[in-house]
Structures are given as C-alpha cells and as structure tokens.
Amino acid sequence: MKKALAAGILLIAIESMVGTIFPQVLSYETLFGVASLVLIGLAIITSGLAVSGSDQRANYHSETKEGRTARLKMAAAFFVAAIPSILCYLLTVLF
C-alpha cells in the first residue's frame, strides 16, 4: 500500500504541474476530480463490485483464493492511490 500511496502522491504532483502549465484550459478541480474518478472506477472494476449478485457468486466459486486476494489487493491499491487526489480535490473545492 505504501507504493500505491507514493504513486498517488506522484500523480498529484504531475496534476499540479499540468494545472500550472495550462491554467486557462484546465482547472485544478477538473484535474483532481477526473483523476479521482478514474482511479475509483478502476478500483470498482477490478474488485468486481460492478457485477450482479449471481455473477459475484459465480466468480467467487470459480476463482482461487490466491486470485481473489490478488484482485482485491489491486482494487485496494487503486483506491489508496486515489486518496491524495480526493483530498486535493476537496481542498480546491472548499478553499
């Protein structure tokens, strides 16, 4: 999870640079918001939350415990990487 958090911090640094270079075209709210939504969307897709109950049950019974653990770790990493962008988005919107 430390690597995912470091990747999220690196992402907000890149977003800040892009926002500084193109202030007339892209606002900080847009950059941080889009990055947050993309990362949370990837977390939802990789975790399998976007499928119906019968599909979840079929996936649970057809995959191995190691595969399930790896999939959930990947989803958690995407979510942890989104946390810095979410915080920066909230800071730019509130202040």
Image (cartoon, rainbow, N blue to C red):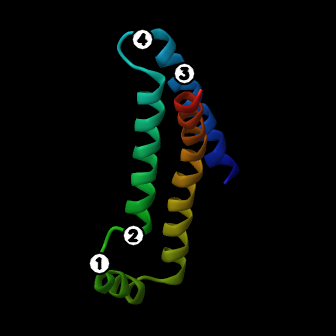
Tag 2: Cα neighbours inside 10 Å, few (<14), some, or many (≥20)? few
Q: Which residue is mark 3?
A: 16
Q: Amino acid at mark 4?
A: Phe
Marks 4 and 3, how far apart in space? 10 Å
The x and y percentages for residue 12 are 57, 30
The x and y percentages for residue 56 are 36, 81
Tag 3: Cα neighbours inside 10 Å, few (<14), some, or many (≥20)? some
Q: Are marks 4 and 1 in contact (CB under 8 Å)?
A: no
The x and y percentages for residue 19 are 48, 17
Q: Which residue is mark 2?
A: 49
Q: Amino acid at mark 1?
A: Ser
Which residue is located at x 37 percent, y 61 percent?
A: 45
Q: Amino acid at mark 3?
A: Ser
Q: Are marks 4 and 3 in contact (CB under 8 Å)?
A: no
Marks 4 and 2, how far apart in space? 36 Å
Q: Which residue is mark 4?
A: 22
8 left or right of 44?
right
Q: Which residue is mark 1?
A: 52
Which residue is located at x 53 percent, y 17 percent?
A: 17
SS class, disc 1: loop
Task: Tell me which corner region of the image, top left, top right, bottom left or bottom right, holds residue 54.
Answer: bottom left
Marks 2 and 3, how far apart in space? 31 Å
